[in-house]
Amino acid sequence: MSQEFKLSLFRSWAVFVPTCLFSMFTDTIHMMILFFVATAFSTFRKKPLEITTRSVIYSIVLSLTFIVLLNSFIKIENRFYLTPAEMGIPTALIFAMALCFFDSRPTITSIILILSVFALMMNGDIDKSHEVIKLPLPQSFGKLENIRIIYLVSFLLVSPSFYYLMNRSQNRLKTVQQGSLKWKTLKISLIISAIIATSFLYFPVINTAVPMSRDFESKIIQLATKYRFNRTRSAFNDKITLKNSYLLNNLDLDKVLIRVKSGKTPGYLRSRIYNTYEKGSWKSEEKPTIMNLLSTDEDQYTHSTYSFNGLEQEDKKNFDVMEVYYSSDFRVNTVLHKGKSRYLEMTCEALNQTDSATVTGKVMDYSGGVTLYNEKGSSEEDSYESPIVTTENSGTYLQVPSLKMVNELNEVFFDIDRTDANTVAAGIIKYFQDNKFEYSLNAKLDYRKGPISAFLEKKVGHCELYATTSVMALRSKGIPARYVTGFFCSEQHPNGEYYVGRSMDLHAWVEYYDNTSSKWRIMEPTPAGFMPGDRSKFGSFEANWDSAKNQWQKFMASIVRGFFAESVLIFLTNIFHLFLWLFNTPIKAFISLSILIYIYLKRRKKKKGKTQEKDVLTLQKDLHKLMKRVEALKDYESKPSTTLREIISFLEKRKDSTSTEYADCLKNYENYRYNTSGRSSEKFSNVQNCFKKALQSRIS
């Protein structure tokens, strides 16, 4: 058995064992198929790949392509492992398979060894609470204790291969002679020590280090979240004062705060709901309850699915999917959602929900975005339909600060038809229209009289004043109502791929309870012509810049969620879209081509300056002829790393006239080749004649 074949065999075995474990533990076969295909190709290849820039780049690109495709089409349950090994193990194994195509140099062997050991370690990082049910093994192997036995046996089987690869990949030690008894004893001692240390540390690591690392991770995320939002725009706080509205204090109303990917207009996105109004301020005093977590690992900070009102898991294909991405400088402590949202996904530790569906949480990371699953067929004006108003909770939605306000509002809206809640809501809106109320963010009101009184007197104000007045008017007539804040998002980006919510799209509206149908309904008192999102604010440059931001947010969100394959696909897709954008119009195509041609000519000129001149190329032809004669000598040892100076030294040591003549010729060539400042046509002719004369003499 040749050394090359033996090395190839041990390489394959080192990769096979962790591949087999991964396929067994995850109940998949795709990695095994890939291994056998790669092994077949590497076995029957005529010669190994040479390590060049091109071969390395091609191998990396091909490996990444396999990783992305396999992860896209074959999903592995992440919670089988403590760490996200569903990407780590295939990545290490695929790169190890690719390296098996290269030659047997120690560097390649050592990298294969490292990747194989890493994959084997990741295979052993199994969640201790997990019990395998779908393993293609007898039922007794389904327990975690038996999986550890399988893992230990696999480790023992692959250890000889690791030991052999260590021998082939290491450098010679100066203090210990390689292959000696002392050398072997040293290595065996190190291996045994590592096994013993690993065995003794296993349970302390699982029971102590892992919980500590999770707690440390949680603290770091809290600090990072606090620091990141320290100097950002904030909205939807526990208490809002109408005199100091967020909109009134925000100078940049065109700032994009959210981006929404949806198949239909998002419309109303609810954030915080307020029920108590006193002294010109709204308070959110509902007690939250923990939302139902539909993931299995409740104590892990991860991208998880939560359900509204304790709903059980349903097939997500039955819902309309909406993705919401928050701007990095927009600070909120609530989660935007639709009235008909049934599930949401985001990265956090836990989420809470009030009866009116104000969603707050613990350690929420908005960089991963929020995915909403809404009822199919829901519209942009759907309200949240809970809770059902009863005699026990009606006081929450009928609170009015004073009897004086009730009398004032009933006097203003005295002639409204009180047949039912819908008629009253329509009458309030009609009152604003008939009395020509106007919309303005800059209205100068005398807030000493109270926001509502000042608004009704001046007949001008912003959406918060319209909504507050409407809620109090409805309540004064015995109709339960609540004050809702969020976004009205209807501005579509020019590329048609997503919607944006700007600072000016922050909005307040009303939800009132219809006793006839026992449902909550949306009431929009703000004049239609001043509704947020009626006009697109995008210029050509801003549209392209915002599109780039959106793609970057999607890319980062995929990484935060752990969808590494999806992030690579997004990156590649963005490159393709950028190429299409550069050539989608004749003008941009002309400019893009001009720039590319200029860069190409610039690089070509630069490369040409680095290339050898024609005279050197001419001399090199004669040099190659001379070198063939030198390499044919019996006492000459040919090595790829031999330098021209070493060849000259070798010829001078032979001390025959022909060798001396060859050496002098090579010296002249060396002086001409590397002394660029002293070149001339005369020196070129001298070197060329020297080669011709030397080639006429045979060396032996």
Image (cartoon, helix red, strand yellow):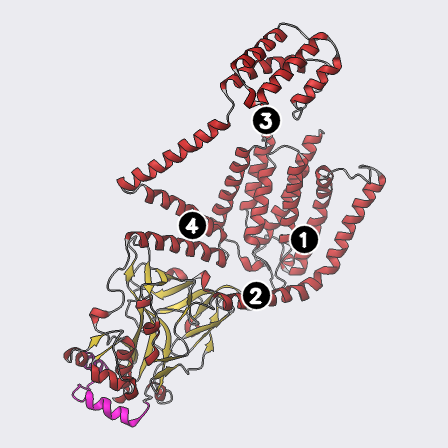
Question: Residue 289: where, in percent of width, then height?
Answer: 46, 78
Which residue is the extreme one toward the left? 434
Q: Which residue is mark 2?
A: 220
Residue at the location (72% across, 45% down)? 159
Residue bounds of the magenta highlight = 401-429
| Residue 112 picture quarter | top right
Closest to the camera, between mark 3 and mark 1, is 3
Q: Is residue 227 left or right of residue 631?
A: left
Mark carried by residue 46 = 3
Mark carried by residue 570 = 4
- Element under disc 2: helix
Q: Is residue 64 left or right of residue 161?
A: left
Q: Looking at the image, can residue 99 be seen?
A: yes
Mark closest to the chain's N terminus, 1 or 4: 1
Mark closest to the chain's N terminus, 1 or 2: 1
Residue at the location (71% across, 15% down)? 651
Mark closest to the chain's N terminus, 3 or 1: 3
Question: Residue 568: where, in percent of width, then height?
Answer: 46, 48
Real-space CA distance between mark 3 and mark 2, rounded to the nearest whole angstrom? 53 Å
| Identity, as a three-letter code, of the amino acid under mark 1 | Ile
